[in-house]
Image (cartoon, helix red, strand yellow):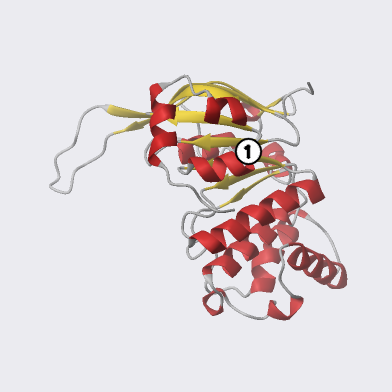
Amino acid sequence: MNPALIEIRNLTKIFPLGESMFGATAKGEVRAVNDVSLDIYPGETLGLVGESGSGKSTLGRLVLRLIEPSSGSIRFEGRDLRAASHREMRRLRRDMQIIFQDPFGSLDPRMNVEAIISEPLVIHETMTLTARRARLTELLRAVGLDSSILPRFPHEFSGGQRQRIGIARALALRPKFIVADEPVSALDVSVGAQIVNLLSQLQREFGLTYLFISHSMPVVRYLATRIAVMYRGKIVEVGDTRQITEQPQHPYTRTLLQATPEIAV
């Protein structure tokens, strides 16, 4: 097996409990992610599944260093992300991107599609306007959209179209690794199925590696190479998709499999 693209060791994130609405300060802390160790291999989709509040999205953001861990280590291609300087992280972010859950909230309503997808190119690359326009056309075509939409604004699109625009933005710098954080949970089932199929197609086309976060075991089962099950901040089970879905070892995994209805993808 190839060396891991992402190596996570003993990763922990502790949030202190804050003030209540009545002004009283709650004492204590919440371990949103608790001593998690995982490897993610090049070209695979690792499905991270668990109920809301289990720590999945926090883990995804920790891996990208969008939030800082309390302890533990994260390595990307052998490089220690926690030790990386701001300048080093800026370079590394070209290779690590995120697709957000909410296609309504993740796109700036004041920016048109051209500005939204161009933003990472403007920040990270030096290219002519002609070359940038060509890249935008290529990206939109890859996600099933047309360059005629470039002057339009997010409110003019459906949820599925907005998510496609968000995916195009994530692909702009040709990353190696993408965290897909519940990318279909805000969409209806048929549109969500189209987005899942698109992500699978893009993975083959661009050689992507995914951490695919979801509360839906059927969606993860369809897309993932391997599955990690998260419960109360801990990974309770990891294995090949068939093993996890057909021979689950942990009671929580069995509960997830029994509780989630099937989805046609």
* Residue at mark 1: 224
| Horizontal and vertical percent position of residue 246 | 54, 28
Vertical relation: 33 (above or below) 125 = above
| Horizontal and vertical percent position of residue 67 | 50, 39
The amino acid pointed to by label 1 is Ala
Residue depicted at 44% across the width and 28% down the height: 253
Asked which secondary structure carries label 1, the reply is loop
| Residue 16 in the figure: left or right of residue 224 | left
From this viewpoint, is residue 106 visible?
Answer: no
Vertical relation: 151 (above or below) 139 = below
Residue depicted at 81% across the width and 71% down the height: 133
Q: Classify 10 Å Cα crowding around label 1: few (below 14), some (14-19), many (20 and above).
A: many
Residue in the foreground of this view, choosing between 140 and 21 = 140
Residue in the foreground of this view, choosing between 230 and 92 = 230
Residue depicted at 30% across the width and 28% down the height: 29
| Horizontal and vertical percent position of residue 83 | 63, 26
Instruction: Kindly indicate the quadrant of the structure image that contains residue 254.
Output: top left
| Horizontal and vertical percent position of residue 71 | 49, 22
Residue depicted at 67% across the width and 81% down the height: 151
Residue in the foreground of this view, choosing between 57 and 119 = 57
Please state the total of marks drawn on the protein image. 1
In the rendered view of the protein, which quadrant contains the N terminus? top right
From this viewpoint, is residue 210 visible?
Answer: yes
Vertical relation: 57 (above or below) 129 = above
Instruction: Kindly indicate the quadrant of the structure image that contains residue 20.
Output: top left
